Image (spheres, rainbow, N blue to C red):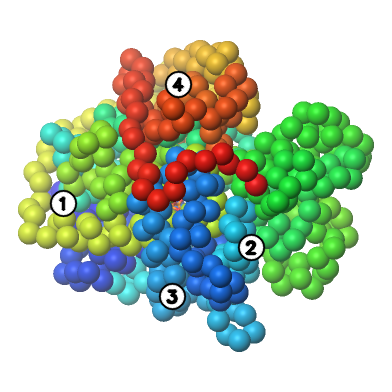
Amino acid sequence: MMLQHDVIIVGGGLAGCRAAVEISRTNPSLNVAVVAKSHPIRSHSVAAQGGMAASLKNVDPEDSWEAHAFDTVKGSDYLADQDAVAILTQEAPDVVIDLEHLGVLFSRLTDGRIAQRAFGGHSHNRTCYAADKTGHAILHELVNNLRRYGVQIYEEWYVMRLILEDGQAKGLVMFHIVDGKIEVVRAKAVMFATGGYGRVYNTTSNDYASTGDGLAMTAIAGLPLEDMEFVQFHPTGLYPVGVLISEAVRGEGAYLINAEGDRFMANYAPSRMELAPRDITSRAIAYEIRAGRGINPDGSAGGQFVYLDLRHLGKEKIMSRVPFCWEEAHRLVGVDAVTQPMPVRPTIHYCMGGIPVNTNGQVRSSADNLVDGFFAAGETSCVSVHGANRLGSNSLLECVVYGKRTGASIARYVHNRKLPSVDEQRYIAEAKQQIQSLLEQPGKYRINQIRQEFQDTMTQYCGVFRTEELMREGLQKLAELQQQYPQIYLDDKGNCWNTELVEALELQSLMLVGQTILASALNRQESRGAHFREDFQQRDDGNLLKHTMAYYSPTGIDIQYMPVVINMFEAKERKY
Ligand SMILES: Cc1cc2nc3c(=O)[nH]c(=O)nc-3n(C[C@H](O)[C@H](O)[C@H](O)COP(=O)(O)OP(=O)(O)OC[C@H]3O[C@@H](n4cnc5c(N)ncnc54)[C@H](O)[C@@H]3O)c2cc1C
């Protein structure tokens, strides 16, 4: 018999788990399932380090949700939807307290209240944290709570298709990585919480599983993707590996230093220095490197990284506040941050864009229409609280606030609804066909080879600095790589743990997402937030204070635009 649930959620990270908990709390009689291609506890959320913002006022009594909202909108370069930001920042203190009640152990002040630290772009100390392992602390408790609420978990199942018929989501097709079994699941509501796409680029802080599958499945189903040109570079990826050194390190007072020994942020954001927003700080590092003030491994000028210097913080502070960052640098590049500066450079970190949703998490099919039965939250979605640039510690917050809201709205949506009818045999046959042809095709290319070329192409042609000429060339190169896809060759023809097959499907997601990023970026002839055009260096509010909606089809990508919700703060020049 076909598998069926009232609600099926794809993604076991913070957004998916928080939604599942909320659905079960709202209506315990609903049958809820969560699918993940790894174990939920291995979702990328577990790697989040620095913390989660909320104006609890434990450290800074002057803080308020309005101040948090303003910082978020200014950080977004005014592209965020302000109704969504108001919800995010107003609900923040409550969701933090609620997480604590679910069992999350936050770091404390000496009087026992939840501690809060400084973070880039935030005007008050408002980031709550669990040392530098905040995601780990939160995700473990949420997954425990799934068990408590009786949510069914499908772990190591790869979802390969969204079933969307007549404007309604009806279920999905997935296969079990363990034994290759294909199943169709029908449901009254489908939710995507599939995370980001960092693996589109060759150097990223993200997990191997961050391949944008949810985005690709949504686009293939004919639905738009919003604001995909806004790709966040985190300023401090450890050189050369790219893994993240949390912004918490700068929040605790670390300096950025160039080859001349200068704290160069004085020239880019004098009032915020190292705690400027990420787009500005990443560009500053890229300029320093381009101007020959980067550093080489032997300490000379002209190299590919700058220094992140923690030495003045002292051993005790380093080991109590950011012990994991110390350990990463020590283990991966042999640097003892107590006595030596860390080599860092920008690394791909976060996608501001995604599946467009309203503030109840329901997916949009256009600026004015919604899809029945289809919801999304977390990094894969775009309710647009981050606009053109996300502030650090606002993403975990978004996952929890909008995971919860989306869960509540799903519980309302499925009430009194019937399960849709789905032609199981047809979907199974099509999925078998797709997998069979991947296994049998007599190709000449290795997955790894095409993926590496693709990732290098995206990094080179759609990185920190963009121009029309570069991006046109990038699209051309990408089209050539896409033509090679049907000629990839798999060594493993088996059913059992065929990770090569998973990688082949993921490569398809990556390339589709990359194409959407390039096409959206090419069309936006201005510089805003993380999207910097050397040929259009100014922000153009007159023409482009609006969201991109990119519609994929096999013949190309059609770009339309959608208005921004502005009801609190008028767009102003952005200076720090
Ligand atoms: C190293 C690092 C540190 C960070 N630190 C912070 C921080 O301190 N503060 C902050 O606010 N943000 C931080 N972020 C960002 C934040 O962690 C993420 O944006 C957020 O955790 C994303 O959560 P999510 O629930 O949307 O997705 P994820 O946690 O990425 O989960 C995605 C889920 O979808 C599943 N999935 C995907 N595709 C499929 C498929 N095809 N089939 C089945 N399952 C699938 C995966 O298995 C996984 O369970 C950090 C990010 C990184 C990479």
Labelled pair 3, 1 in contact (Cβ < 8 Å): no
Residue 440 appearing in the image: yes
Q: Give the residue pinned by disc 2.
A: 118
Q: Give the residue pinned by disc 4.
A: 523
Disc ID at residue 188? 1
Task: Please tell me which of labels 3 and 2 falls first in the chain.
Answer: 3
Residue 180 appearing in the image: no
What amino acid is at disc 3?
Ile
What amino acid is at disc 4?
Asn
What amino acid is at disc 2?
Ala
Residue at 68% from the left image edge and 43% from the top image edge = 281
Q: Nearer the viewer, mark 3 or mark 2?
A: 2
Task: Please tell me which of labels 3 and 4 falls first in the chain.
Answer: 3
Task: Please tell me which of labels 4 and 2 falls first in the chain.
Answer: 2
In depth, the one of 226 and 1 nearer the eye is: 226
Query: Marks 2 and 1, how far apart in space?
Result: 43 Å
Labelled pair 3, 4 in contact (Cβ < 8 Å): no
Q: Position of residue 164 (x, y in %)?
A: 20, 37
Residue at 16% from the left image edge and 36% from the top image edge = 167
Q: Give the residue pinned by disc 3.
A: 97
